Image: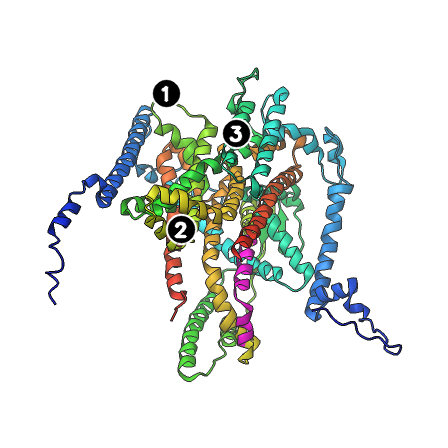
Amino acid sequence: MNLKGTHPAPEPYLKEIEKVPFWLDPKWRAVIYQIGVFCMVGLLAYYLVSNTIANLQRQHIATGFGFLHKEASFEIGESLIPYSAASTYGRALLVGALNTIKVSFIGIILTLFLGTFIGIARLSSNWLVSKLAGIYIEAMQDVPVLLQLFFWYAIFYETLPSPRQALHPVRGLFLSNRGVALPVPASIPAYKYMLLAFLSACVAAYFLKKWARKRQEETGKIFPVFITSTVMLLGFPLVTWLLFGAPIEIDTPELVGFNFKGGIMLSPEFIALLMGLVLYTAAFVAEVVRAGIQSVSKGQKEAAMALGLKPSYVLNLVILPQAMRVIIPPLTSQMLNLTKNSSLAVAIGFPDFVSVANTCINQTGQAVEGVALIMAVYLIFSLSTSVFMNWYNKKTALVER
Amino acid sequence: MAMEPYPQSAQAEVVKPPPTSVGVLGWIKDNLFNGYFNSLLTIVTLFFLYKIVPPFVRWAFIDSVWCPDCAEACKKAAGACWSIITSNIRFIIFGFYPYAEQWRPLIAMFLLFGLIYYSSKNKNWKKSLIYVWIVGLFVMGVLMKGGLFGLTSVESTKWGGLPLTLLLSVFGLTAAYPLGVILALGRRSKMPGIRWMSILYIELIRGVPLISLLFMSSIIFPLFLPEGVTINKILRAQVAIILFTAAYIAEVVRGGLQGIPKGQYEAAESLGLNYVLTMRLVILPQALKIVIPPTVSILISAFKDTSLVVIIALWDLMKTTQSVLSHPKWMGFSPEAYIFLAILYFLGCFSMSNYSRKLERELSQGEER
């Protein structure tokens, strides 16, 4: 069939379309809009930057990150690495960053435990427990975290006695307005090897789990991974300890003069910050956990039980994998919130990154660089978390037929 | 289906259920003592409550001191010293606002509460609501600032306490909302340049803590401006809060936009509507309705987050309280003062979150047919 005869030649029609002026063409218009917006943002940025440079020059404030190599000449209350007033600003900021990581890391672990516990308590069939958990969640979510930090800090320095009259509930534990003194295992080789043994048990448990899963997929046999891993995690350090002749050496704090010696001393700032962050974030985590568990429909549980699975398998193979998919994304954002909220340490004087950076700004006057550093550090935390989240989401995304 | 009454003969006796499965006892058995584990849990919990609640009640109510200006009595009392609140309530709530003029922020606050209450009713959601708000905000502004209608002028540097907290959060949300909607539209735009700029802004702001933006507002903003131009500190903090909140609103609105089915866009396009009209008449009215409950939770966090301005030394509720606490006469009564603040914040947030839950139910009822 010859179609050419039935249709007129399309050329003149197309030409008419091409004649559309470029300011009415959506493609060109998009380009023009974008150039317009870029120009506006660029002009605004140029205006702000030129003002800033002029102001900095007028006030004789240095620019650049050269100050990082200069002597900081201020003390920092607590530090994970050796630091003194003679160290550089760069090192001071590193101390701050490590403190932020320390409080966030410990806080996240405690929050996960407390939050999961309260979330499950909220779902309990026991009316009293469920209501109490509900009250806790509502009360903690509705009071600003900064107020909670101030409250715990005030409790510490106002209601607790001085080190001389420190509360002494159990042997080796002292509560005073200087902080909490705790006994720790002394640093003897046996304990170090026990730690090594524990870490190797963790690695072994990981590979055991992989192997057991592979075997289960191939042969259908189920290996008791949980019990074996628990035995390994407890057994390895225990055997090491016995091999070294079961030494017991504990570094207990003692009151010497006006302060404690030995053990470890947790400052009131650190404890107030940790308590505030953990108690506050745990309320949100509890809601996340509750919503996640409730998101798995009842039919799933009933179907699994109808298949004759054991209750522990119902939980591990059916409920948890589906609940985790709902729980993990909001949970990560709560962990990130905790890390960001740890910046409130500056209000109660715990030397985290923000408060060290703030001191640096006050001393050098280089506010632009200081604030930029604060933002950069937190952006690194958030970006690395979101990279991890994307990877995890891809891994656990629902594979549909 | 109506049940036929059971034919009762003289022999058939109606057997009542056992007393342990109905009434109060039945409820207690079902909800507190169903099984060994739950019974144990109940007993342990009751024991802890017995250990904690009576001493707290004793401290807070029985042994406490309430009369104003009883700092001396407080030092001797075993219980709480609410006297710190009753003596300083006006300073805590209003800060340095001139004492004789404090009725003005009080009326402004009640006006605000009234407006919020009025707007919380579905039937008032009309276009006129916007005008009511504009007039209301203007009247509040005049009341606070003065200088008109024979009111003496009060510099904004003297504003403080609860009005400042409310001002920062309410203005923060109202100004951040349009900005957030624009950013959300930008993030879903087909133009790559605009999309990437919106993504950059949203992720940058959401990645940093509010305190870094507040530092920026208090230390770096003055550097941004040309020589001789200064902006008031409250306004600078307000700008930081707006920029911060906008990024979060953008994400919420984006969720609403994603919830609109594609058919709606296509229908609007086939009617010949252009982008602006499509958004204004078809998409946004639906999307913004979906996101009202999450928006209320953003308002809650904005309200809580305003407490951070204490770090850059603005005289909000927290700062006025701390300044009372630093007075030698009232030193050592921080727990009482902070508990009072916590109750204030709790009342505000709790009523908002309750409202958001109620709204969620109402809105979802419309969907389920």
What residue span does the magenta drawing correspond to?
A: A283-304
Location of mark 1 (residue): B228
Q: Position of residue A228 (x, y in %)?
A: 50, 76
Q: The residue marked by circle 3 belongs to what chain?
A: B
Rendered residue at 32%/31% (across/down) = A48
Q: Is residue A87 left or right of residue A287?
A: left
Quadrant that contains the C terminus of chain A: bottom left
Q: Nearer the viewer, residue B31 or B2?
A: B2
Location of mark 2 (residue): A382
Q: Amino acid at mark 3?
A: Leu
Give the Cα distance between marks 3 and 1. Answer: 30 Å
Can residue B307 be seen here? The reply is: yes
Q: Quadrant of residue A219?
A: bottom left
* Residue A283, above or below B336: below
Q: The residue marked by circle 1 belongs to what chain?
A: B
Circles 1 and 2: CB atoms closer than 8 Å: no
Q: Amino acid at mark 2?
A: Ser
Q: The residue marked by circle 2 belongs to what chain?
A: A
Q: Is residue B315 left or right of residue A8?
A: right
Of helix, strand and loop, which one carries label 3?
helix
Of helix, strand and loop, which one carries label 2?
helix
Of helix, strand and loop, which one carries label 1?
loop
Q: Dot 1: few (<14), some (14–19), or many (≥20) neighbours within 10 Å?
A: few
Q: Amino acid at mark 1?
A: Gly
Q: Position of residue A90 (x, y in %)?
A: 36, 42
Q: Nearer the viewer, mark 3 or mark 1?
A: 3
Q: Position of residue B248 (x, y in %)?
A: 44, 45
Location of mark 3 (residue): B137
Rendered residue at 63%/21% (across/down) = B99
Rendered residue at 72%/52% (across/down) = B52
Q: Dot 3: few (<14), some (14–19), or many (≥20) neighbours within 10 Å?
A: some
